[in-house]
């Protein structure tokens, strides 16, 4: 009987051979999440409380209405279902922000991840620095899920997206009646992140008035919700991120120097994509897989020409830009392969990749010669005159670029 | 899907019988044990 897994148990607290709570504990050893309802004798509230403490879902005092029991059973089933769902979702989240999901083939990115692993287990404040779109949030999540706090909340605050007037209340919460419209007290982000991690994105954009309060949390691990008389203590690991040059912000007087030294203890700098081109292939494969799954559309590969174009691009928008590029191409492609024409369409010249001068010159020269021949309808003498070149030299150019003037005669 | 299973343990056999009938009519599979 013991070996069998039940969905739920109802156990009388006083059994002849064993007490019900011990039996519950034995059953929980086999199936720790099974909800148990304990039946207690009238007047034994203490043992009921004891049962709850030791893992019972609920208790019923005898005599009870069987309808009440059915109600309890349904409740237990529901909350058990929710519990499983939460576990499943947490698992999914963890998988999503696992290190396996950060593409790092390049040396630079490997160094970043090694650093992340090293610092994750500590409680130190970490500053994730890097251009927009490099994946600062992903790294912050990886730190959280590699830390001891992984089962606790991970709260993200996009400081720049919250109006200054609301930011304080959003971060630290407020008491009921603290200001007009505060009809009930509210927990701030810091309180929500208790025992977990708070990620303050774009900390460089935080107004100076809030910076002072933030400093207090960092130094004393406590803060005052708006309108509160007593401070609230929190145990929170803080990760900040910014794409600004904080040092410059300090010099300009826009960022408090004392706060700067507090947050910059352990900086982790994510290199821009153009400095880790080795990762582009891996990222493309990653996004192909991810979007194939999301879009329910099998796009398996990308042509070498298209890949070449991706490798040469300068990626001012970093990984986010690459991701969008792949998403666009996958949406537009009719087949299973991404072709060159779907990549980086409508990019203006200024965003074209920098190539060696020799290649740039050659490309220009070839284009120039072709245009001349189009203009002169394949007349080499005329073309040479326009170019201010001797005919023989012009023929050399044609040979170099394998251009046949005859092809232009029909036009 | 099979109906959810419930283990009921109570030394009061009358109560056990009532609970079993009640729960089974609510479409649960019940295993009743009296010791």
Image (spheres, grey):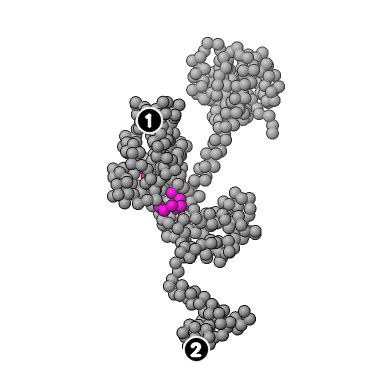
Q: In which quadrant of the rendered image does the C terminus of chain A lie?
A: bottom right
Classify mark 1: residues with Cα within 10 Å, few (<14), some (14-19) or many (20+): many
For residue A226, the mark is 1
Residue A340 sits in quarter: bottom right
Instruction: Return the chain for callout 2.
Output: A
From the viewer's perspective, tell me whether residue B26 is left or right of residue A356.
right
Magenta region, residue range: A124-136
> Residue A380 or A77: which is nearer the viewer?
A380
Mark yes or no: residue A230 visible. Answer: yes
Q: Earlier in the sequence, mark 2 or mark 1?
A: 1
Q: Is residue A378 above or below residue A240?
A: below
Q: In which quadrant of the rendered image does the N terminus of chain A lie?
A: top right
Instruction: Return the chain for callout 1.
Output: A
Q: Residue at x 49, y 46 (%)?
A: A98
Residue tagged 2: A392
> Residue A405 or A118: which is nearer the viewer?
A405
Q: Are marks 2 and 1 on the same chain?
A: yes
- Residue A69 position, x and y percent, is 62, 19
Q: Residue at x 69, y 33 (%)?
A: B1
- Residue A87 position, x and y percent, is 54, 36
Mark yes or no: residue B13 visible. Answer: no
- Residue A310 position, x and y percent, is 51, 62
Q: Is residue A189 above or below residue A327?
A: above
Q: Is residue B28 magenta?
A: no
Q: Residue at x 55, y 11 (%)?
A: A42
């Amino acid at each position: 009987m013991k070996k069998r897994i039940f969905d739920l148990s109802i156990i009388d607290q006083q059994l002849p051979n064993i007490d019900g709570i011990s039996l519950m504990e034995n059953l929980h050893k086999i199936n720790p999440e099974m909800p148990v309802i304990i039946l207690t004798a009238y007047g034994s509230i203490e043992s009921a409380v004891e049962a709850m403490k030791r893992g019972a879902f609920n208790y019923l005092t005898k005599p009870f209405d069987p309808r009440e029991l059915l109600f309890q059973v349904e409740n237990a089933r529901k909350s058990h279902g929710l519990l499983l769902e939460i576990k499943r979702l947490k698992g999914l989240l963890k998988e999503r922000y696992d290190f396996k999901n950060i593409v790092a083939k390049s040396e630079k990115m490997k160094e970043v991840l090694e650093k992340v692993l090293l610092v994750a287990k500590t409680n130190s404040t970490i500053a994730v620095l890097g251009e927009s779109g490099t994946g600062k949030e992903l790294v912050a999540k990886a730190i959280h899920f590699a830390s001891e706090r992984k089962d606790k909340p991970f709260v993200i605050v996009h400081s720049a997206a919250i109006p200054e007037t609301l930011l304080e209340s959003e971060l630290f919460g407020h008491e009921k009646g603290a200001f007009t419209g505060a009809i009930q007290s509210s927990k701030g982000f810091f309180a929500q992140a208790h025992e977990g991690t708070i990620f303050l994105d774009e900390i460089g954009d935080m107004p100076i008035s809030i910076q002072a309060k933030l400093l207090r949390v960092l130094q004393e691990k406590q803060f005052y919700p708006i309108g509160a008389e007593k401070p609230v203590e929190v145990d929170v690991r803080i990760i900040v991120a910014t794409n600004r040059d904080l040092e410059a912000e300090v010099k300009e007087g826009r960022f408090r120097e004392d706060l700067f030294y507090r947050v910059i203890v352990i900086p982790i700098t994510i290199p821009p994509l153009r400095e880790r081109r080795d990762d582009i292939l891996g990222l493309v494969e990653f996004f192909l897989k991810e979007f194939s799954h999301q879009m329910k559309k099998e796009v398996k590969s990308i042509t070498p020409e298209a890949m070449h174009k991706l490798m040469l691009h300068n990626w001012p928008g970093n990984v986010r830009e690459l991701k969008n590029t792949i998403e666009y191409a996958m949406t537009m492609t009719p087949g299973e392969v991404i072709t060159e024409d779907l990549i980086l369409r409508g990019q203006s010249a200024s965003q074209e990749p920098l190539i060696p001068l020799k290649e740039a010159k050659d490309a220009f020269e070839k284009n120039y010669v072709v245009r001349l021949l189009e203009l002169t309808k394949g007349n080499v003498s005329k073309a040479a005159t326009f170019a201010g070149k001797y005919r023989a030299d012009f023929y050399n150019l044609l040979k170099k670029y394998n251009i046949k003037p005859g092809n232009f005669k029909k036009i | 899907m099979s109906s959810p299973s419930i283990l009921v343990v109570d030394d009061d056999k009358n109560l056990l019988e009532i609970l079993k009938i009640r729960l089974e009519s609510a479409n649960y599979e019940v295993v009743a044990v009296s010791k």
